[in-house]
Image (tube, rainbow, N blue to C red):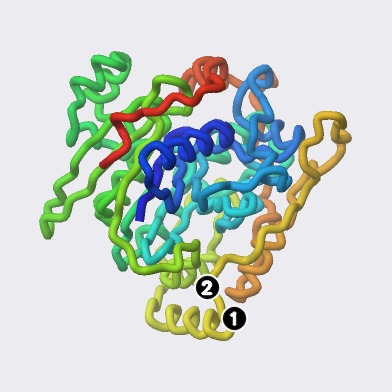
Amino acid sequence: MKIAIEGCMHGDLDNVYATLLHLQEVERTKIDLLICCGDFQAVRNEKDLESLSVPPKYRSMNSFWKYYSGEKVAPFPTIFIGGNHEASNYLWELYYGGWAAPDIYFLGFAGVVKFGGIRIGGISGIYKSRDYRSGHFERAPYNNSDIKSIYHVREYDVHKLMQIEEPVDIFVSHDWPLGITDHGNWKDLVRDKPYFQKEIEERSLGSKAAAELLEKLKPPYWFSAHLHCKFAALVQHQDGGQLTKFLALDKCIPRRKFLQIIEVESGPGPYEIEYDEEWLAITRRFNSIFPLTKMPMNFGGVEFEMEECRNWIKSRLKSRGSSKPFEFVRTVPCYNSSQTLANHSFSGHIHNPQTESLLEFLEVEYLLDKSGPTHSQSPASGSVDYDSEDGPIEEDADEIQLPEEEEEEEDDVKM
């Protein structure tokens, strides 16, 4: 099975897909799956732009809406996680994972799926210690503070991933695991990105949560993005001699290393995205303590009988007759360049039928529209410092378009 890995998408699906189709033709190969490491920007219409954490002057529809509307069809099954520049209102509809568009699957704020027998896991967002222990307190429509915190990784989602016992083949995070630079050529990295040196020396470059997951899961492959450069590392785990090949990739712009092709052993198929039994069991067990406020989580009272949960899930899937995710459903109108959406449209939370169907299947409560005691407060000035915590937005915005002739990384497609 050949899997394409892409760094930061920034909504530029047209050019990424065109590049891969050209690569297939030139290399006379077949790509079975595309995985994107965040900043996907699943923007369906102008209203979604209001939940995109970038300065308003840099908000652009880009090309995802064409796949959401059905105007275009993804040429490859696509799996993505969220980063720190996302249409957060839409991803919250699909918190547990689901089809963002036909053949384009969001892995959820945390999740695991199977594809042709390969287990693929991931965690969305970036790590910020001040919000890590909080619950998911943000609710649409987001204020200026919420729009900058909703994508911060939460301990609850990491804790669920830490319950995984069966091997995961590929794991995806947006920011890098803390300390990963110890396992690669960090001197070359600093030569290209000198402002990383201080963080590397202070051991603050990367995510503590991702580092914990790397140590626990030990997947053969781990892919990230976020820092807009390519960096490879090889992690030798202490127990059992297991190895993790780590690779971070760039954003989709010319002459940058944003794509990689890997080949992994897999079964005969079918090559399609399917629910993962163990992850469904974990989701069912922990949904009752879904944190909805800023209060720190306490996991002490949670008992987890995996065998019992797995047997229940197995029985439910057998009764359903399929382990495929529930079908894609459009929940808002698509972008139309000749029309403007009314300002009052879709300002609150929308129940996505995919999410409702999954929770009904798991026989758990729908909690995504429940609120904590209060909304978080906006900054006193009413403005947002977009750049201070999450990197140079200007660099993202003004370089995002590829020229009409897609540029390939011909020397960079095997791993």
Residue under the image location 57 percent in, 65 percent down? 325
Q: Residue 151 location, x and y as percent?
A: 54, 40
Q: Is residue 185 above or below residue 122?
A: above
Mark carried by residue 320: 1
For label 1, count other residues whose C-alpha is less than 10 Å away and answer few (under 14), some (14-19) or many (20+): few
Front residue (pair 209, 66): 66
Q: Residue at x 29, y 29 (%)?
A: 411
Asked whether disc 1 touches disc 2, contact meaning CB atoms under 8 Å apart, the reply is: yes
Please tell me whether residue 368 is drawn above or below residue 294 in the rendered image.
below
Residue 47, image x, y percentages: 76, 35
Q: Secondary structure at mark 1?
A: helix
Location of the C terminus (image quadrant):
top left
Nearer to us in this view, 359 or 319: 319
Q: Residue at x 31, y 67 (%)?
A: 165
Residue with the mark numbered 2: 323
Name which residue type carries label 1: Arg
Q: Quadrant of the N terminus?
A: bottom left
Q: Residue 53: which quarter of the image? A: top right
Tell me the quarter of the picture where residue 42 sits.
top right
CA gap, disc 1 and disc 2:
8 Å
Q: Is residue 139 above or below residue 1?
A: above
Q: Amino acid at mark 2?
A: Ser
Q: Position of residue 203 (x, y in %)?
A: 25, 29
Say what secondary structure mark 2 lies in: loop
